[in-house]
Image (cartoon, grey):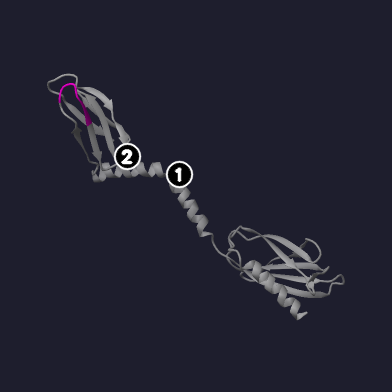
Amino acid sequence: MKKLLIWILALILLVSSVFAYYPGQTLRIPALYTVNDIPTVVDANITIKLPNGTINVNTSMADDGVGRFYYDYTFLSNVTGGYFMEVNFYNSTGSLQGIAGDFYEVEYNHTKQLDNITSTVNENKGMLQDIWDWVESTIFGIKEYSTIIIGKIKQYNTILFKTTLNFEPTNCEIYINEVLYNMSIDGKIATQQYYIASGGLHEWNVTCE
């Protein structure tokens, strides 16, 4: 009988050491009773104690075949620490045939909490960016951009207005000779091609936000 008890304990220890457990998680607890390595007909009762020693469950396990049992248990949502689970095996006359037990350590699921934080940040990323843009422009006033002209400034030529910014704009407009154009935006660069159809004075101004 001593050999049997050691073997059962080793089995349950192997099962319980593979996983990390969290409050609210549901776990299927298996148990196996054998004699000379052969599953044998018995009954099984499981007792589950909370970390403070209070008995939370004391009931029969579900039959899963000869000598095999299981019990589905959901850890309490607000309790962490070492849960002790003990299985008692009885024969048909109610005599105790063996005992197996182990501690299941339950801790907060910090990974899930981080996932929730990440999800919240992603959902509100646009709002946070808007707030930061407002802080930059209103409080710090550090939004800056400058425009250069690329190409020959000559009649019947096409030139490129290129505006470089220190932030990513949502809209850039350029007035050329009092005509408004929406510039193409790529990250922190805004561009606009313009065909010089006539000679003389040409005025332009860029506004970005």
The mark closer to the camera, 1 or 2, is 2
Residue 36, percent from left and from top: 80, 75
- The residue lying furthest to the right in this view is 93
Residue 187 got which mark?
2
Q: Quadrant of the N terminus?
A: bottom right
Amino acid type of the residue tagged 2 in the rendering? Gly
Q: Is residue 166 left or right of residue 21?
A: left
Q: Quadrant of the C terminus?
A: top left
Q: Residues within 10 Å of mark 1 (few under 14, many from 20)?
A: few
Q: Residues within 10 Å of mark 2 (few under 14, many from 20)?
A: few
Q: Would you identify the image quadrant in which residue 166 lies?
A: top left
Instruction: Identify the residue under disc 1.
Output: 123
Q: Residue at x 81, y 64 (%)?
A: 66
Q: Which residues are magenta?
A: 154-160
Residue 73 makes an appearance in the image: yes
Residue 92, percent from left and from top: 86, 70
The disc, 1 or 2, on the residue closer to the chain's N-terminal end is 1
SS for dot 1: helix
Amino acid type of the residue tagged 1 in the rendering? Glu
Of 81 and 12, the residue lying toward us: 12
